[in-house]
Image (cartoon, rainbow, N blue to C red):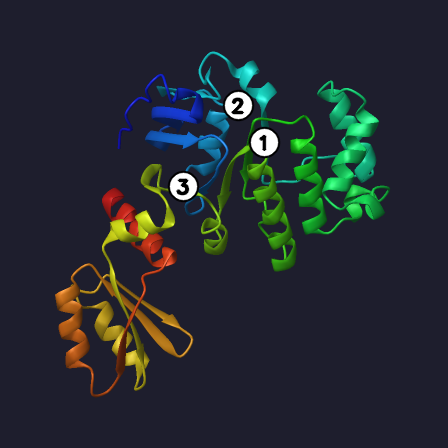
Amino acid sequence: MVTPQPSQENANDIAIDVEGLTKSFDSKVVVRNLTMRLRRGQIHGFLGPNGSGKTTTIRMLCGLLTPDSGRGSCLGFDIRTQHDEIKRHVGYMTQRFSLYEDLSIRENLEFVARIYGVADPVDAAQRSIRRLGLVERQDQLARELSGGWKQRLALGACILPAPDLLLLDEPTAGVDPKARRDFWDEIHRLAQGGMTVLVSTHYMDEAERCHDISYIAYGDLLAQGTVEEIVASVGLTTWRVTGGDLTDLAQRLQSDPAVDMVAPFGAALHVASRDAAALERIAAANSESHVWTRDETTLEDAFIHLMNGGREART
């Protein structure tokens, strides 16, 4: 999937513009011919199963890894030759908490401010503490914080030097729903202030809060666009089935070549197919024993379909 080069008049609106990125470790291709273009000032969701190449892609974008082939720019800097320039303008929050456990929140932020040469590091740390609601905890050691508070501290450290681009690698993994909601509220405030955000996540509700999303599986970028565009692109027709023996019905549907997906949702089945007419015939044939109701195709349906297709292409 090759994206056309932006024209000169809108090139400044593009935060990330890469084409044909490939990266291998030993003989394993981790990212294959990836092309991606992200606009400035928006939140971009980066989704995919474990081991799909998300982290490797993020590291190539911020200059920590050099691609084996391909070209591109990040914030106007060449990802192959201008690593240092990229790092000065990008905040990168890794999957693992990477600040000092034996320092307090305030001490960690002041240290980061000094490392980045921020003017008046004490005042800069206090502004970040107030912004993220950490005032009452600022003297608490990082090792004593819960997962949600640690992630909030890590975000504060990333945005303290005022980067133009924020790269977040599964920032809310293992965090409770309330902390996730608060974290995402702050991400939206940052984007409203002009910051560009690329965030990898496994959560569908988080993906739906992004301006657009990219889906990578088994090293290949399979889809890119808004939620509505991606759901429409897979062309699935979906039905909700209730009543009768759902276990037996699910087994029969899973063996039917016209059915692309069968998934239990509580006391119902979610059944989807790219062949709308065939699925309607199946619904009619089983209407006496079960209640079939047309349903909306979800983002999760679309991603499971894309993931299964990507797996089949690699086998």
On the picture, is 209 further left or further right than 149?
left
* Vertical order, 251 against 211 (above or below): below
Mark 3 Cα shell of 10 Å, populated few (<14), some (14-19), many (≥20): some
Q: CA distance from mark 3 to mark 1?
A: 19 Å
Q: Quadrant of residue 301?
A: bottom left
Residue in the image at 57% along x and 44% along y: 188
Describe the element under mark 2 as helix, strand or loop: loop
Find disc 3 in the rendering and name its residue: 52
Query: Which residue carries the number 1 mark?
Result: 92
Residue ranking furthest to the right: 139
Query: Callout 1: helix, strand or loop?
Result: strand
Residue at figure coordinates x 24%, y 59% from the top left: 236
Q: Is residue 124 visible?
A: yes
At horizontal 78% and vertical 42% (from top left) the residue drawn is 142
Mark in the foreground, 3 or 1: 1
The amino acid at mark 1 is: Tyr
Name the mark nearer the viewer: 1 or 2.
1
Query: Image quadrant for the N terminus?
Result: top left
Q: Position of residue 10 (x, y in %)?
A: 38, 22
Pick whichever of labels 1 and 2 is earlier in the sequence. Answer: 2
**What residue is pinned by disc 2?**
64
